[in-house]
Image (spheres, grey):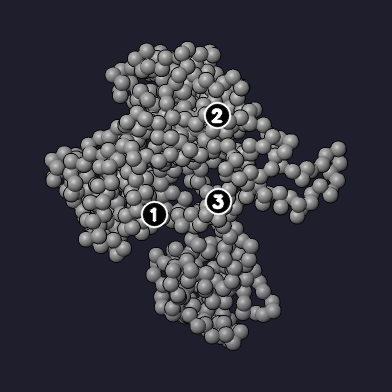
Amino acid sequence: MKFTAFLSAGSLLEFCAKVLGHALTDRPMQDRDCIRLEKAVKKATVSTTYMPPHQRKYRVVGLTRQGADRLDFDRDGTKITVAQYFMDQYNLPVKFPALPCVRCHPSRNILVPIEFLDVVDGQRKPGKLSGPQTAAVIRKAAMRPADRAGAIREVGKELALDRFPLGFGMKISPEMLEVGGRVLEPPRVVCRSGNDVGARQGVWNIRAEQFRETVPLESWAVVNFAERQFSPQRLEEFVGQFVRFGGSNGMIFRNTQPPISRGNSNDPEGGLRTAASQAEKKSHKPCQIIVCIINDFDKIYNRIKLASDCVLGIPSQCMLANKAVRANPQYIANVQLKVNMKLGGNNFTTEPSVDPRVDFQLEKQPYMIIGADVSHGPPMARGENRKPSIAAMVGTYDREGVKYAGVLRDQPGGTEIIQDFGGMFAQLVENFSNMNKGCRPFRLVVYRDGVSEGQSSRLSIASSCSSAALASASTPPSSPSSPLCRRRKDTTPSSSPPTTATPTSPATSPPAPSWIPSSATPRNSTSSSSAKAASRAPPARPTTRSSTTTTSSPPTSFRASPTASASTARATRSVGLVTPAYYAGLLADRGRAFIGGDDDSASETSSVSSGSGMGLPPVHPSLAANMFFV
């Protein structure tokens, strides 16, 4: 089952009021509101209401910046305004003449007041969804596996596709396809105490535990970009709660009263620079992280990340004011999972390899786990240049395989194959060497997300790695394992035998992090010889499968691991993708934020650091080995 967002049908005037969050009045609209409305209605299909019963349909090209009482055109040699035209031609007074008009044709001068148009029903929302819209779609689409299976069966019965002959001996079965599977043991998730916190149904609770490794927080600052929603007094109380909860998680706050400053949404870089200076002045040490309180991710998030990651070289952590003001312990704990990793700590780890054939001690057989992904911009209209694609690659550099460094590149839009794979790999190897006293990785496991099996032959991962190693005058690593990561979104786990498979209740469904299809890997592959590598990317959920396309000798080949998706530092639950590929996707999204995201009116500030227009600005060198992207 697929879900998407549709435009609300009905009056365009009411639709615009919903977008802006307030009723429209007969006053000139500010440019920022006009740009926001234009982004929401552009390319939408509208119908006219001023000629009943005849309706004309148009596709919105844009909005004017002037109202109907000021926009004029030549009619039979006489200047006439749009408002006057509708009064003379259709005897319709324009009730909101100060509001902008809708441009309804790319070449002809067709201008219609907003109040005389309706949004046509059944239109998929164009462009990228905002944060709240995405959350609403997720809430609507979230269903238990048994409920989803039942809904799919009901749709199949309504369509009754088995009634129609297809020819060639083909027919459509009314039942879903059944695939045999097996249940793997859940992973051991370990915190500072060394005890298993107990993963149940893909979720674990570390409230009574402390982070496995923490870094003392001596110099930090807080910037409030949402003073209307978060008063300075309330923010001081929140900082105290943040410090108290962090102490219970094992974090060490040497400075419990960081400087709190007011941020300007029009100049986030200036606000962050001032906050960093205040933190350094108070603690006499460089600022380690800046916490930002914001009220809207879509408006300011990209500019904050551009300033902190590319200009200042200081990790930042954004928090929504409407969530922070509640001071929910679970929300604060989730934020501190990210903060601890950005400081260089380690939240938790999974059980290391128990395969006696392989010794993954860093001193003897150093290894590196790599994740790679590419993020593409939205499709553009004909004749427009597509935004560049962002290639991202992350690689581990620590003994436990939980700390990652990241590398970004931009490439022509729509290109899925990473063009500078070798150069990015060489950069990760160099970082590995710098963090490990000149030691270079001997074994590699490369997870590549976003490509099909048909494209796997074009990846050339092994040759790219070897070429990069030779170019950097290092010993080429052993032939890398390169699994392709695929999401099995349409799979419903069932504990019943195939002959009696029925939708099951949560009580009888296999645990989420430990189910894999038996066709994904050989049955004898449960002894994860690269558990310190493959398992460092969190338990395979029903939505993930990895297939090996290139393997090395048996002692170091890739094996399916029950901990393939349980070590993601951002949450205390397994995810639907192995951690390296998951992190690579996050880094690619961060790179897209640097160039303005998927917004058509992207901020021009991205050219400040890069000097190349919409080119990708480089990440600050001080963050080369920092997980700023989590």
Residue drawn at point x = 28 percent, y = 46 percent: 245
Residue closest to the eye, 421 or 528? 528
Residue closest to the eye, 367 or 417? 367
Residue drawn at point x = 44 percent, y = 63 percent: 35
Q: Residue 184 shows which numbered tag? A: 2
Nearer the camera: disc 3 or disc 2: 2
Residue drawn at point x = 55 percent, y = 22 percent: 526
- Residue type at mark 3 is Ala
Q: Position of 606 compared to 154: left or right?
A: left
- Residue type at mark 2 is Leu
Secondary structure of the residue carrying numbered label 2 = loop
User: Marks 3 and 1, how far apart in space?
Assistant: 23 Å
User: Marks 3 and 2, how far apart in space?
Assistant: 25 Å
Residue 353 percent coordinates (x, y): 44, 21
Q: How many marks?
A: 3
Q: Position of 248 compared to 13: left or right?
A: left
Classify residue 112 by image quadrant. Answer: bottom right
Residue drawn at point x = 54 percent, y = 38 percent: 512
Nearer the camera: disc 2 or disc 1: 2
Instruction: Count residues near mark 2 (Cα–Cα under 10 Å), then give few for <14, some for 14-19, many for 20+.
Output: some
**Tag 2 near tag 1, CB within 8 Å:** no
- Residue type at mark 1 is Phe
Q: Position of 113 compared to 319: left or right?
A: right
Q: Residue 142 shows which numbered tag? A: 3
What residue is disc 1 on? 297
Q: Earlier in the sequence, mark 2 or mark 1?
A: 2
**Tag 3 near tag 1, CB within 8 Å:** no
